[in-house]
């Protein structure tokens, strides 16, 4: 597999630095960096708790939408 | 919804040697995206396959998306005969990966992990740099946004 100029043979993690990928660079401008900055202030568990809360909220909303139909 | 905490705790408490990868690892590193399943790379040593089989057996694991009623036998032999398993369990969805692209197996990946305190347990988790490398190598368009976020996290962490 050749990705971003780096060849991956059998598939183990390589140590050389990855070159910038222009496609990913283009996507970066749409990321809300403030969310990431806030997340970095949290512990890994706090980050996961927030993710799980979001999933619960999504599930609740889907349930409510279904009940409304 | 997948009960990530109970699944991870159950596997760790059973002594299963595993590395958390995928969306849960991304979230633990600070990504703001959500995921629906738990992805783990597991060690393929026979004793570990037995622990993994025993730990998940009470959760009725079954191939995700497969028609009901297939003669699927969940045990260490099934694990030994396969490699990657996408399963649904009574606690939610879990992907058991014997190997991942650009990451290899458990032993290959182990030097590229960090130990994190999550779900009340010390858990091995792929490090951020390697998670980026693996996702890049897979090259799925759906990962581009996630990759942008992960690379920004790495840059922010380095400041």
Image: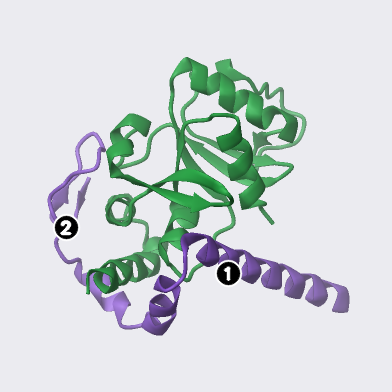
Left or right: B129 in relation to B55: left
The answer to whether marks 2 and 1 sit on the same chain is yes
The disc, 2 or 1, on the residue closer to the chain's N-terminal end is 2
Check if mark 2's residue and mark 1's residue have beta carbons within 8 Å. Answer: no
Circle 1: is it few (<14), some (14-19), or many (20+) Cα within 10 Å? some
Q: Is residue A68 above or below residue B117?
A: below
**SS at circle 1:** helix
Which residue lies at the image location 14% right of the left edge and 61% below the top edge? A19
Chain B appears what colour? green
Question: Which chain letter matches label 1?
Answer: A
| Label placed on residue B36 | none
Would you identify the image quadrant in which residue B73 lies?
Answer: top right
**SS at circle 2:** loop
Q: Nearer the viewer, residue B27 or A19?
A: B27
| Label placed on residue A50 | 1
Residue at mark 2 to residue at mark 1: CA–CA distance? 30 Å
Which residue lies at the image location 20% right of the left edge and 43% below the top edge? A8
Which residue lies at the image location 33% right of the left edge and 42% below the top edge? B101
Q: Nearer the viewer, residue B128 or A41?
A: A41
């Amino acid at each position: 597999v050749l990705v971003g100029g780096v060849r991956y043979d059998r598939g183990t993690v390589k140590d050389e630095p990855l070159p910038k990928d222009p496609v990913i660079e283009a996507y970066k401008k749409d990321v809300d960096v403030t969310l990431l900055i806030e997340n970095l202030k949290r512990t890994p568990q706090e980050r996961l708790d927030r993710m799980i809360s979001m999933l619960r909220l999504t599930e609740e909303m889907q349930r409510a939408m279904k009940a409304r139909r | 919804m997948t009960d990530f905490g109970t699944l991870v705790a159950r596997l760790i408490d059973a002594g299963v040697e595993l590395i958390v990868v995928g969306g849960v690892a991304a979230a633990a590193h600070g990504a703001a995206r959500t995921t629906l399943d738990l992805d783990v790379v597991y060690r393929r040593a026979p004793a570990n396959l037995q622990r993994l089989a025993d730990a998940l057996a009470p959760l009725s694991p079954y191939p995700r998306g497969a028609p009901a009623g297939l003669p699927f036998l969940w045990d260490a032999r099934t694990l030994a005969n396969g490699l990657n398993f996408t399963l649904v369990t009574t606690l939610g969805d879990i992907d058991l990966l014997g190997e991942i692209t650009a990451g290899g197996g458990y032993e290959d990946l182990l030097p590229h992990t960090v130990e994190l305190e999550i779900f009340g347990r010390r858990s091995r988790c792929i490090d951020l740099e390697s998670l980026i490398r693996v996702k890049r190598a897979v090259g799925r368009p759906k990962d581009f946004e996630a990759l942008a976020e992960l690379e920004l996290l790495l840059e922010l962490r380095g400041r």
